[in-house]
Amino acid sequence: MKRFIYWVYVVCLIVLASSCRSLRHAERAPMIGGLKGEEYQEKVISGLPHWNCVTGKVALNLNVDGGKNTKLSATLRMKKGEVIQLSVAPLLGIEVARLEISPDRILAVDRLHKQYVEVSFDELNRMADLNLSFNVLQSLFLNEIFLPGKETVEVSDLHRFRMTSEGDRALWEVKDTRKLACRFRTTADKGWLESTSVTLSGTPYALNWTYGDFGKLGAAYFPQHILAELQGTGKTYSLDMKLSRMSVGEDWETRTSLSSRYKKIELTTLLKMWLEK
């Protein structure tokens, strides 16, 4: 009888321990949009659209610390894995400035003064002690969840995210980044990415992107309103982008070439000229 009672206690302890483990697992995987956390994550990642090219007209509104707005017309062109181009042409379609981001360089061109800045990501990261890459910037423009150091996020990467339910939204936090702390918020029902926050660990610097006004683009949806904000520099810089005439066309030049009339200047010089205006 004593041996029987002993084994009853053992079985009860095993059941209790299993229940506790199940409870802790349930706490780690909250219900979101009617799905368990892991199921919801798989749904979002598996349903992410994959565009080869995205182009459109964009109305830019630049602001510094809530002061005077600078409004410009531009064209945004993106080709997956190759380039992001932002061409500013405020008058009669005449380009006055261009920003071109590719895996090997960032090129900023000032057409009015015939000068440009060309810097590699390695050089930029050394200058600012960052861990920035083309893939991170591409994901910000393309409304994608990302992992620093990876080209694409796959279902097998889900263990690298911490998931929290926030009512009708879900918060994704990347667990294992050292320099960049990345957070994403998606809608619980459709899984659309509504905001991305990238902060530089140990500093006040933060880059916040907010997405809205989702419209049909091909077989999926793309935000037609994007707000990018840079904080922690003493002033808050914001770039409001309202997109229109979106398409997935590929008939455009993906590489900018400059004539010998253009003079190369330092990045700090160009930033000072633009930001003090």
Image (cartoon, rainbow, N blue to C red):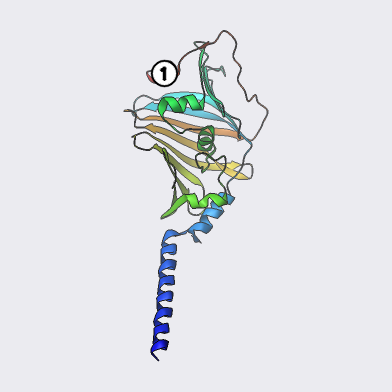
Can you give x and y, in whole percent of width and height, for residue 88 in the image? Answer: 52, 22
Q: Quadrant of residue 270?
A: top left
Can you give x and y, in whole percent of width and height, for residue 203 in the image? Answer: 34, 34
| Residue nearest the viewer, comparing 122 with 85 | 122
Residue reaching furthest to the top: 261
Can you give x and y, in whole percent of width and height, for residue 39 in the image? Answer: 53, 58
Residue reaching furthest to the front: 3
- In the depicted structure, whether residue 75 falls above or below residue 202: above
Q: Amino acid at mark 1?
A: Thr
The quadrant the C terminus occupies is top left
Residue reaching furthest to the bottom: 1
Crowding at dot 1, Cα within 10 Å, few <14 / some 14-19 / many 20+, comes out as few
Read off the residue under disc 1. 268
- In the depicted structure, whether residue 38 falls above or below residue 138: below
| Residue nearest the viewer, comparing 123 with 217 | 123
Q: Quadrant of residue 199?
A: top left
Total numbered labels: 1
User: Is residue 9 left or right of 217 when viewed as pictured?
Assistant: left
Can you give x and y, in whole percent of width and height, for residue 7 in the image? Answer: 42, 83
Residue at 55%, 45% in the rendered image: 153
| Residue nearest the viewer, comparing 140 with 267 | 267
The quadrant the N terminus occupies is bottom left
Residue reaching furthest to the left: 234
Label 1 sits on a secondary structure element that is helix
Residue at 62%, 39% in the rendered image: 51
